[in-house]
Amino acid sequence: MALNPTTRDRLAHVSTATLCTALFKRGLRNQFIQDVRPVNPQRDPKAPNMVGEAFTLRTIPAREDLNPITVFQDRAHPQRKAVETCPPDAVLVIDSRKNPRAASAGSILVTRLMKRGVAGVVTDGGFRDSPEIAQLAIPAYHNRPSAPTNLTLHQPLDIDVPIGCGDVAVWPGDVIVGDAEGVVVIPAAMADEVAAEATEMTAFEDFVAEKVHEGRSILGLYPPTDERSRDEFAAWRKARGR
């Protein structure tokens, strides 16, 4: 099921925190990828979020006799194949078993993803060439920089299969959203409704933030248990076209 363009646009403008709350309301408590952060921490927090359907790469611990440098001569090597077949507008999600002691990829492969129109790349391991990746016009998320080649510890094995990334189950086609705080995974079947609710929540939270900055108490405001707060929000929303 292709990601609805309206849903993609909505998800580009809501926070992962708000999305986590919307998912929590639906019984999903473990959708935020743990210990993963933007390679470029200086990325403009007002920039649109990374949004795309998951395309996955699974690795296992490297075995030395099967993981020499010569494996890269194979055009069907799973890491290379993932980079060349990840669909445009998708997000490449790499299961590196939460092990950043060797790189999941480097700047050349991430640049290739960018040039192919991929929406972003996420690993629960690390990237090498991270200063160069931070300058690229593609969102990238990892645990920490890691200079050793992936062959040192990671043996890419499968693409486009269910994986774990940062303690979160990721199925191909799940919707991946990343902002300045981190990355959340939304099951594909509920992406439309979660995006719609998160958009509503964002409007209300913007109203609340404005009132709190003015010195207002959160009691009766957040949540809006006072009728006055609900009326003020309705007027605020109408005035701002939200």
Image (cartoon, helix red, strand yellow):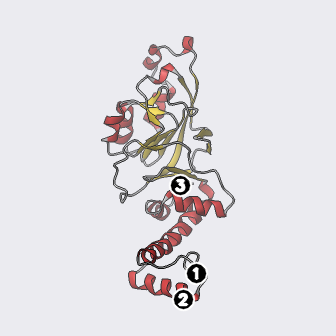
Q: Position of residue 231 (x, y in %)?
A: 52, 88
Circle nearer the viewer, 2 or 1: 1
Q: Position of residue 169 (x, y in %)?
A: 63, 44
Circle nearer the viewer, 1 or 3: 1
Does residue 174 sit above or below 25 in this rendering?
above
Neighbour tally class for label 1: few under 14, some 14-19, many 20 plus, Cα within 10 Å = some
- Is 47 situated left or right of 174 in this image? left
User: What is the secondary structure assignment of the residue under circle 1?
Assistant: loop
Type of amino acid at the residue the image marks with label 2? Arg
Q: Position of residue 238 (x, y in %)?
A: 43, 85
Residue on which disc 1 sits: 220
User: What is the secondary structure assignment of the residue under circle 2?
Assistant: helix
Type of amino acid at the residue the image marks with label 3? Ala
Does residue 230 sit above or below 17 in this rendering?
below
Q: CA distance from mark 2 to mark 1?
A: 9 Å
- Is 103 situated left or right of 43 in this image? right
- Mark 2 or 3 closer to N-term? 3
Residue on which disc 2 sits: 228
The numbered disc on residue 2 is 3
Residue 88 appears in view: no
Neighbour tally class for label 2: few under 14, some 14-19, many 20 plus, Cα within 10 Å = few
